[in-house]
Amino acid sequence: MGAQKKGATARVSEDQEELARNPLQAILLADSFATTFRPITLERPKVLLPLVNIPMIDYTLAWLESAGVEEVFVFCCAHSKQVIDYLESSQWSSQPNFSVTTIESHNSISAGDALRLIYERNVIHGDFVLISGDTMSNMSLTQVLQEHKERRKKDANAIMTMVIKKSKPSPITQQSRLGTDELFMAINPVTKQLLCYEDKAERSKGFISLDKTLIADNPSIILHNDKQDCYIDVCSQEVLSLFTDNFDYQHLRRHFVKGLLVDDIMGYKIFTHEIHSSYAARIDNFRSYDTISKDIIQRWTYPFVPDILCGSSAIKVERQGAYRASDVTLSRSAHIGSFTFIGQGTKIGNDTKISHSVVGEGCTIGSNVTIEGSYIWNNVTIEDGCQLRHAIVCDGVIMRSGAVLQPGVILSFKVVVGQQFVVPAYSKVSLLQQPTQQDSDEELEYADNTSGTGELRYKLNGDIATDLSETAYELGTGGVGYIWSVFEGAQDEEWKHSVAPIPTDKLVKLMLDKDEDEEQLTQDGNVLSASGELKADSDDNGSEDDDNADSRDDYGFFEKEVEATFLRAVHENVKVDHAVLEVNALRLSYNMASVDCAGAIFYSMMKLAVESPHHSASELHRNAADIITKWQKLLKSFLHDIDEEIEVILKFEEMCLESAKEFAALFPQVLHLLYDKEILQEDAILRWADEKEGADESDKVFLKSSEKFVQWLKEAEEEDEDD
Amino acid sequence: MDFQVVVLAGGNSKNLTPLISKDVPKPLLPVANRPVLYYVLHQLRQSNLKDLIVVVEGEDAALHVGGWISKTFVDGLHVEIAAVPEDIGTAGALRAISHHLTAKDILVVSGDLVSDVPPGAVAATHRRHDAAVTAMLCSVPVSGSLESGSSGGKDKTRKPGRYNIIGLDPCKQFLLHIATGSEIEKDSRLQKHILHAVGQMEIRSDLMDAHMYAFKRSVLQEVLDQKDTFQSLKQDIVPYLVRSQLKSEALLNGISQAEENGNEKLSSPNNQVLVSKILANASTPSFHEPYSMEPDGSAQTRKTHKCCAYIASSSSYCVRLNSIQAFMDINRDVTGEADHLLSDNIIGPSPKLGTKTTVGPHCMLGEGSEMGDKCQVKRSVIGRHCRIGSHVKIVNSVVMNHVTIGDGCIIQGSVVCSNVQLQERVVLKDCLVGAGFVVTMGNEYKGESLARKEK
């Protein structure tokens, strides 16, 4: 024990040295490589979008700094210029003991590309924190880093620790409160190793499959449906090189995590660290924007709350979570409800009601306006009598008097909504036209974000006015902007990720649908078990039978494939060598022995002979002879030893009995032919004859018919021996 | 306690040939000189569960078993013997005696269970949760001593004792998933909607379904009636109940309210929600209620039933006698580490031992057995009224009653059934000798199964 302790202390000091050498680094991906925040992200990068009036990236950086990270590499891709400019002008460029370095790329289309680029730069020297710029947290990294390091010492393959947090998705929508889809994770409760990560579980399937090897290896597994992935990862250096090795890894979770979990050759392991009391969440869609904004206002993210983060403009927190900047001009009759943020320089008119909302800086809000659960950014003008419910309104928007935003509306930058115009629910409105080259292929969704922006940019400055005048009616008289149409298929999904709460009728409908589904599924389950119970006794015989059946089936498929290959070879005059290669490839893919190949090829040859036109037995014989002569090399290349030759004879026998009875009469002739062509050696034929000697009478039909030939062979052999 | 106990004392005997014969049906197979059924009945009596139906396959066997029970448990147990046809499965057997079931809850125990887990605790758990079914789970027995494992063939070493895959809720009270038999070898399919309701499920492959279940009688009878294809409790009925626990209305519609009077769970769900809300702080949280609420929090429309698990502590003993290997293990354990299962002394009252004969620890000698000089007995069980000659060596073996063993025999790792005669200098290694068999002088057998031909 004492020795161990000494060792431990020695190691601790080593750690400290190591720490001294390598300051804690973090990679911050300032691009989400997704399109969920369009149309806003066409004009401004997601990390710079204000979250309760402060750009998201500030929350992330502030947390990293407080958590002891000393060096942050900010990877920017889309709108990289804006991000770099912002960081340079911000407080982060001049912090002591906290360096922020930007890495710019213009052709990265995924997190995978980003990490590969960073690997090439060779700036990461040890364990690092991988995080994207839209993640809010106030957790302490000490414990997770320590756990990670200790695991690494014991097992060099433990290369990543994921932070998870409890969050039970609604049983009705199967969606967490952050609007992300349900996530299934299997974790070993003792080691906390992540065993399975399923975020795109098929909705239609009523069950989750766990690989049997997982269960065999882990006596106890906890399958979680109530955890949320915080997208905060502590990684070892290997992670970067793994991305370089596997150049097809794009998505951090979908490809990298799942890839590691499936791959059992390298044996890399991922572990989880659950946080209980601290906050961590990622803004993935509009719903999480809404949720996290509320969390911030309600100070779950303390100390990362607006009044502390921006110390410059004094923000006062009043009762019931009402945040108010110092120089707000507020009408006496205006009513500011609870959990509301009002930014600097904003003017609010008479009888206006605002609740559960964020209003940015420099906004002008008229009289009799109702704002509920909405996010209004900076310099927005809202004229008298407007109504906003659960909407996001970006910088510079003008809403003419009496305009109404129904729940879930997104107004992108500088949109103008005409008088009395009602923007329908879940509309996304932008000055930019909707990119037309929408790629429905989900795999490519990262791609169009970056490529699309450049092309669209010019419209903003140049002929925007003329352009818009044509379609101005979309937003009523005097309105400016396009209402983006919802792509097909996504229509039903829109409400899921919107800022607006899910309407009750949707919930009821979902609930009913689910009942039906489940009914169906249970019924299916019953059917399954009903068939299963027939072989109630799970003795080994049963499973063996299954195995045999499987392999028989396999052979059937294999034979068909070989036949198809052979026929193609015949018709297209493929060279024998190539045919050999192809059959060999088939053999490997079906996991067959060369005995099977010989049988299958011979079968195909004879079948071809039978199927080619013939009128008499002699013509059939000639057909067979032609084919055998032409393709003997193919057959011979699979006849390495006597067993395979015997297999050919047996196969032939089987054919004569079943599929090609015409050959029955020709059996001895063909056998002789095969002998003449040196496809079969006399040993093989004699062995076959010997084996058959003891068989049933019915089995001996062909032995008898070829008796003479066999006899002759025997004599020849004896003569040889005499010589 | 209003509990009726059904002891399923039938069972396939093919795994246990040649130990079982017409004269010795499986329930009466002696384990450490007592019929295996004794262990179950003893535990039931200890738990004060005295209203029993013992179901036996075949009339003859029923007579045998009945005779033995009336002789042994004269006091305290109220036992009915029911004979059912052979090969109708456990569910079939229950169906056959269904009309005898009257109590509110039914405890179904397999007659071949040798365990020190109190059945009363299972029954109590069942009652406490007001469950539709409660299954007793125990740790997977450390099957076979290591040396026998190696001889058991590749198959057994490949999958070290996985009997069930079991899903439990975080409090380990509810049974959420159960896979038996051939399903274990496949990828597990876990039902999402149960997972949604409960949030997290622990999947254990180190637990075994010990085939002791408490059922609510109404539920059991309903399932038996409706699903007439179900044959096995373990493979059909229990998995079915577990699978459908969150939407049992289709199943339990037929239950009249009057019958379920005392049980607000099924008949008045609203009430249940209220009750669960009131108890929310005090009682153990259950995922069944919140799940069944409508989104607007109004009345609950779905009916659920609870499937509970009673997990025996890892130190308890629990093995089913369903193979020769298990038979050997149980004999060894009952005389050895789990000797608390036997209430009385190990060496019978009047063994006559010759000079220089040694009987090692973990051995058992039945009453009236005699041994000659210079014998050695190690880790073995010897039945009643056996005559054992001189210079006999018995190691790791089971010798049943009325066996005659000649001088100089060596018996290792074998089972010798009743009335067997071993003549002089017989050597048996890993053999099974059926009842009444005679091994002639000087023969040596290894790994064989010897049985008299049925007349």
Image (cartoon, rainbow, N blue to C red):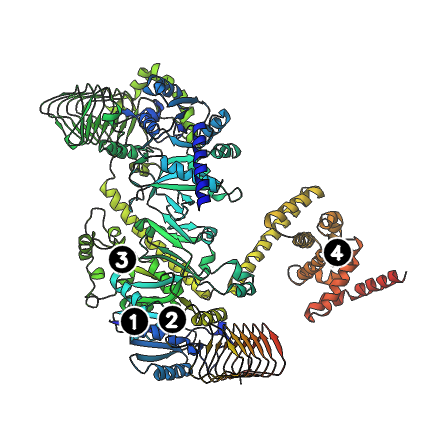
Q: Chain of mark 4?
A: A
Q: Nearer the viewer, residue A487 or A46?
A: A46
Q: Kindly identify the amino acid type of the residue bearing the numbered disc 3.
A: Thr
Residue A573 seen in the figure:
no
Report how far apart the C-alphas of labels 3 and 2 lie in the structure: 40 Å
Labels 1 and 3 touching (C-beta < 8 A): no
The residue that mark 2 highlights is: B340
Are there few (<14), some (14-19), or many (20+) residues within 10 Å of tag 3? many
Residue B372: give x, y in percent of width and height: 54, 83
Q: Which tag is nearer the camera, tag 1 or tag 3?
A: 1
Q: Secondary structure at mark 2?
A: helix
Q: Kindly identify the amino acid type of the residue bearing the numbered disc 4.
A: His
Q: Earlier in the sequence, mark 1 or mark 3?
A: 1
Q: Secondary structure at mark 1?
A: loop
Q: Kindly identify the amino acid type of the residue bearing the numbered disc 1.
A: Ser
The residue that mark 1 highlights is: B47
Q: Secondary structure at mark 3?
A: loop
Report how far apart the C-alphas of labels 1 and 3 lie in the structure: 30 Å
Report how far apart the C-alphas of labels 2 and 4 lie in the structure: 82 Å
The residue that mark 3 highlights is: B304
Image quadrant holding the C terminus of chain A, namely bottom right
Report how far apart the C-alphas of labels 4 and 1 lie in the structure: 84 Å
Q: Is residue B398 above or below residue A723?
A: below
Q: Is residue A294 above or below residue A222?
A: above
Q: Is residue A376 above or below residue B104?
A: above
